[in-house]
Image (cartoon, helix red, strand yellow):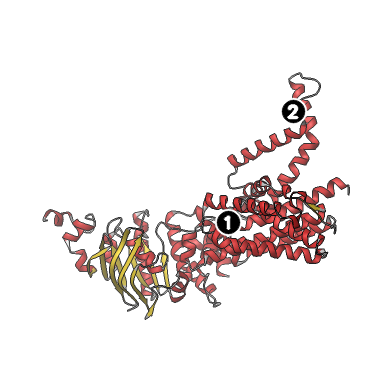
Amino acid sequence: MLLEVRGLDVRYGRTHAVRSVDLDLAEGEIVTVLGANGAGKTSLLRALQGAVRAADGSIRFAGEDLTHASPADRVRRGMMLVPEGRQIFVSMTVHENLMMGAYLRSDGDWMRDLKEVYDRFPNLAERRDMKASVLSGGEQQMLAIGRALVSRPRLIMLDEPSLGLSPLFVNNLFELIRELNRGGISILLVEQNTAMALETASRGYVLELGRVVLADTAEALAGDPALAAAYLGGHAAAPAAIQTL
Amino acid sequence: MSGYWTGILTILSINVIMAYAIFLPVATGQLNLGGAGFQALGAYTAAFLSAVAGQSAWATIPAAMAVGGVVSMAIAFPLLRTRGVYLVLATFAFAEVVAGAILNTSELGGAMGLSVPEYLDYPVPIIAAILVTLFVFYLMATRFGLTMRACHDDDVVTDLLGVSIRGVRVAAFAIGGALAGLAGALYAHTFSFVEIQSFNASLSIYVLLYVLLGGTQSALGPLFGAAFFTLLPEVLRAVLPQVKGALAGLFGIQGALSPPDESWRFVILGVLTVLMMMYRSEGLITRTLIERLKPGRHPASATVEEASA
């Protein structure tokens, strides 16, 4: 397993955001984490990257125990979180944003990775010296993902990347996720767009109030009408399936 | 050059160095309203070493920078736990503590102040200000400078990218403290006298204004802000009588006007400050402005070749 999470607990004061979550992700896999707002998805990702401390449980990545490692150590070992809401550095240019992704790269090869990002996203290359704040929503998401790629990650964790994007762009985004995965990057995908997420991922977890209530293959989850109605607001289910409940 | 102009250039140089001292923490997203306290540390270190220990300026100036840097690094760890308005208050309180401590230390002259035997003429602060300006421009162009701006923009994401935000902020705060120490030492040696009343709250406020109104996005901002606010009162001093006379003439008023010119300068300065806050809240010098002023630059078409080069 590339990522092995056991009994992970996250607390903010008296709020218990993530409760005893077990999660596995094999190298080369796309795994999705689904759930309603407030289910603990973002807290889970933030704990995995080390931005919040795990109150209990363990996180192993590539065979190493990283439960108490700093975010920097996790980035160095190949974990990279693309946070929710396209958080780019607004006062910086596109190029400067991408350079920040290489912050921990001490090898000289990051220039090549940067060039690969420009090859992959020609729009970003064209806007290289423009302020990142003038990019469109979709371009900002590409920039956030590009910035993650410059760190040369083994695992990218995406927090609701399709949020607020146009339907056309959402298709491009999921195509990009599959493409990155074919290139050898493992993906942990937190999404509200459950239909697309289950189409893209091989397995999925459903969180409710911080707990994993369902864990199955993506196909099984997609075909589960109870799941669709109860936890996911019906996005994944055909209307007929809801009527049968 | 007349004594008037050399005096102004000296003040301007010290103000520029102070502006950069405060700019560095501000560039990482930390407002520092304790500028006067850090400057006082440097000024009294230099004054004490010069007056009591008989050291030359070659020793007092580095010592003042070291004291400024070490003290600010030491207090940065607890201080930078606070944020926003609380950090502003904490830095302000620190400056008051420094002032109180100096006022009650008889070895430092207490309320009487200290005379500084060694005098440095105006070229020294000017050269120092130029060197500091070049240093800050260089620093902001390095990867460390980029990281400072990242901390300012979004500390959550910066942390996720593996940057030690604390380390960056403490470093910026400490370098700023050392620069304030330098400004203080230059003050001591060029004015030949230090008294704690010169390092008061309004100095801290003015220096922060230089930075905030000059612009925090680029190293040009503080330079411009310090120059603007140091020179504007002098310009107003020169033109105010005529302006006032002309205005009074419009309303048919003859003879002497009250209040005197001196207070009118500050009224105009205050009005300009408020206007700048309203219309240029990111400071006078922004990155967008710099970009626009660059000759022959068309960002949209500039760069596919550059990227692949």
Provide the secondary structure element on which disc 2 rests.
loop
- For the point 40% across and 64% down, the residue is A52
**Depicted A24 relative to depicted B8: above or below:** below
**Depicted B42 relative to depicted A119: above or below:** above
> The residue marked by circle 2 belongs to what chain?
B
Residue A191, given in percent of the width and then of the height, sits at 32, 61
Q: Nearer the viewer, residue B24 or A108?
A: B24
| Residue type for callout 1 | Pro
| Residue type for callout 2 | Pro
The quadrant where residue A230 appears: bottom left
Mark 2 lies on residue: B259
Mark 1 lies on residue: B299
Residue B23, given in percent of the width and then of the height, sits at 63, 55
Residue sticking out furthest to the bottom: A63
Q: Nearer the viewer, residue A124 or B136?
A: B136
In contact (CB < 8 Å): disc 2 and disc 1: no
> The residue marked by circle 1 belongs to what chain?
B
- Residue B295 in sight here: no
Task: For marks 2 and 1, give the CA distance.
Answer: 52 Å
Provide the secondary structure element on which disc 1 rests.
loop
Residue B81, given in percent of the width and then of the height, sits at 51, 59
Residue A79 appears left or right of A212: right
